[in-house]
């Protein structure tokens, strides 16, 4: 390979990418729409729970405990997010679909105690605009034959 070709080859490789669409999103003003199977924070439905304790028993991380709570003081799941691996067993095995995943990933805290979610707290999932106030656009990604493409959708 001639010296000139050696020098210009890297530029020739990079050049086409300069004119392609951006492959990143500018979080927190933009945020991806995650897949329906995405595992973010849980949402709990009081009205569906039958207090069977299956979620507590199947949790491999011992992150779920049934604790008294809710409008009737019966035992409902509490999740400790300091140990939860978001494996999905509790969601999968709950016979009443009382637990489900949301696409909320913005739930970091400054102390460990705040990551223990009571049944009440689990049942309330804030609106994305409350959690990410600077959010202006949501971006849906999809694959074509050649590349990943992005389309804007309503927040
Ligand atoms: S997602 Fe997995 S680790 Fe987290 S609470 Fe449910 S069963 Fe336990
Ligand atoms: S959340 Fe589901 S698995 Fe857990 S106690 Fe309630 S009904 Fe049973």
Image: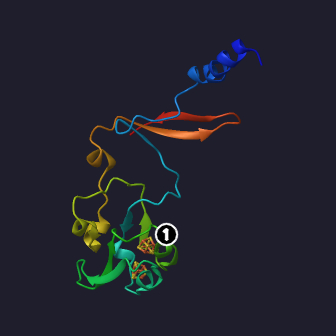
Name the residue beneath numbered marker 1.
87
Disc 1 C-beta below 8 A from ligand 1? yes
Q: Position of residue 41 (x, y in %)?
A: 38, 61
Above or below for 83 versus 15? below
- What residue do we see at 27% from left, 71% from top? 116
Asked whether, in this view, residue 135 is left or right of residue 32, the answer is left
* Residue 65 x/y as whole percent: 33, 82
Quadrant where the N terminus lies?
Answer: top right
Judge by depth and name the residue closer to the eye, 18 or 103: 18
Q: Is 109 above or below relative to 44?
A: above
Ligand 1 shown in quarter: bottom left
Question: Is 128 above or below relative to 7?
Answer: below
Secondary structure of residue under mark 1: loop
The answer to whether residue 143 is above or below residue 120 is above
Q: Quadrant of residue 102?
A: bottom left
Classify residue 104 as left or right of residue 3.
left
Q: Residue 123 or 39: which is nearer the viewer?
A: 39
- x and y percent of residue 140 in the render? 51, 40
């Amino acid at each position: 390979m001639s010296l000139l070709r050696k020098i210009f080859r890297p530029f020739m490789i990079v050049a086409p990418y300069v004119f392609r669409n951006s492959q990143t999103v500018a979080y927190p003003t933009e945020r991806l729409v995650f897949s329906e199977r995405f595992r973010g924070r849980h949402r709990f439905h009081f009205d569906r729970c039958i207090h069977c304790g299956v979620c507590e028993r199947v949790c491999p991380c011992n992150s779920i405990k049934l604790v008294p709570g809710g409008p009737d003081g019966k035992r409902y799941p509490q999740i400790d997010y300091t140990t939860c691996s978001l494996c999905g067993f509790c969601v999968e095995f709950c016979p009443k679909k009382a637990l489900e995943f949301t696409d909320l990933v913005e739930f970091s805290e400054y102390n460990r105690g705040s990551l223990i979610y009571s049944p009440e707290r689990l049942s309330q999932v804030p609106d994305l605009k409350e959690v990410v106030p600077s959010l202006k656009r949501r971006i849906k990604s999809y694959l074509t034959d050649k590349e990943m493409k992005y389309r804007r959708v309503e927040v």
